[in-house]
Amino acid sequence: MVWKQLEPTASHITYLILSSFLILYALFSLFVRNRLHLSEPPLATLVGIIFGPKGFHALDPAKWGLRDNTTQELTRVIVGIQCFAVGIELPKFYFSRHWKSVAMLLGPVMAGGWVVCALLVWLLFDTSPATALVIGACLTPTDPVLAASVLSNSQFSTRVPNRLKHLLSAESGCNDGVSFPFLYFGIYILIEKAAGNIAREWFLITILWQCCFGTFMGLFIGVSANWLLRFSDGRDMIGRASYLVFYFLLALFSIGVASTLGSDDFLVAFGAGVGFARDGWFRKKTEETHLPNVIDLLLNSSLFVYFGAIIPWHAFSNGPNLSIGRLIALLALILLFRRLPFVLALKRWIPNIHTYREALFCGHFGPMGVGALFLAIEARAELETGSSLPLPHPPKGHSEHKGTIEIIWPMICFIVLGSTMVHGLSTAIISVGSHFSRHKHERAHFPGAETDALDGMEHAIGAGDSEPSSEEEDD
């Protein structure tokens, strides 16, 4: 007989498992990051899988009553906060000096990746072209959550030039929002029948309202908040402890404004971060607080545990034309052709990429993660309800877009799972490979413990850094 005082409810067990994982990771975080070269997302996902419904069944979000609409809001908030954080962490006036490189990644590289993903989905799964365009759009952006976990605060990241880290961070902060035109282009083709209606809705709503107005609104929010905080700080009206609170609240405020107005959540959040920290003042005031590390450990890791627990394993072979073999083939082809060929081909027109080794690194490093999950539910919501509010579960019975609704979520989840593991383990593979490619007398005492620049990457002053010059810092 179990003692009646014990109350191992689903929520209580979740608190215990999640906090235990985060405590263990925090205790050994330097060893995990700098010796094992592992980041939080793959480990957190494995925890969710092991303790989730397919493992020990200790973590089951369904028992909490958490449904697809909850997943949508969780991913919206986490990606939005991470986009805001990317905007904060970029060097001051970054886009005025590096807009060409970012534009190439957000333009031809991203558009090419969209087309490649759509073609692969269409060929492998025999979907309609419009469905393939929608799924391809979900897989197009580089995820800011996964990117942040690998690019920041690790020994491996010090071996990558700052200009590449900042370029990939800036891209990841922008392109979840920039993917909205790709996503809604496919959605409007599915929903609207007349070409004129498709063009009008896509241009007026997606391009002008969601993207253009959303970017302007985010910059306005950020610049205004910067002025307000400077005003308060200059008159000693705010304590240092409030800076962290202000950071999170401003990120949530920007997401709330965007979602309420039906604008692009992620462009608004990223624009707010860029506008807020455009002059570097807030970054200097908070550089000792390590805010991004707090976000990575608490929010991002928790979300990947949640993702591991909600992976729809049964749907990987039950949906229309879905099978494990086809999904593995799709994952492999996407990792090879979604991004890498375009970055290599356009290397000469991307000023921040100096060598083909750097182009290879940037081409490979385009993880698909939490942003793809949000976009998948956003697409499903538009097809299910005609709005951005999804049903708790996919609808039963006949639906005009039944095939698209049934295939999009399991396919995106499988690709995100694969990308989380592949890109999360890439740093370990690169580090260990670099170690054993050296002569014995040039190797560090421990595999992957080297601290010098990765082969084929330029770290020279004026080439490996994307920070402003000393003259610009004085302005």
Image (cartoon, rainbow, N blue to C red):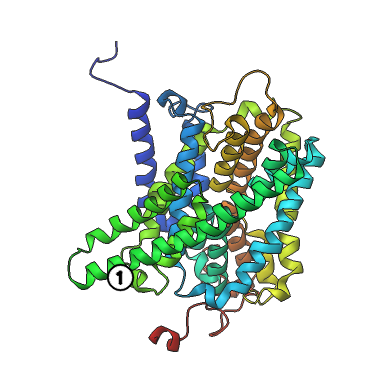
Can residue 137 be spotted in the picture? no
Q: Against 17, is 110 above or below?
A: below
Q: Is residue 128 shown to the viewer in this render? A: yes
Q: Is residue 145 above or below residue 123?
A: below
User: Mark 1 Cα within 10 Å, few/some/many (few <14, many 20+)?
Assistant: few
Residue at 63% x, 40% y is 412
Query: Farthest residue toward the left?
Result: 236
Task: Give whichever of 31, 26 is nearer the camera.
Answer: 26
Q: Is residue 327 left or right of residue 441?
A: right
Please give the residue where the numbered disc 1 appears in the rendered image.
285
Q: Is residue 9 left or right of residue 169?
A: left
Q: Position of residue 116 (x, y in %)?
A: 76, 51
Instruction: List x then y, in percent, for residue 212.
Output: 56, 59
The image shows residue 248 at horizontal and vertical percentages of 34, 54
User: Residue at (39%, 54%) from the top-left corner?
Assistant: 251
- Judged left or right of residue 463, residue 284 is left
Q: Residue furthest bottom?
A: 471
Asked which quadrant contains residue 375, the reply is top right
- The amino acid beneath tag 1 is Lys
In the displayed image of the protein, which residue is found farthest to the top? 1
For the N terminus, the quadrant is top left
In front of the other: 111 or 165: 111
Viewer-closest of 179 and 383 = 383
Q: Secondary structure at mark 1?
A: helix
Q: Quadrant of the C terminus?
A: bottom left
* Number of numbered labels in the structure image: 1
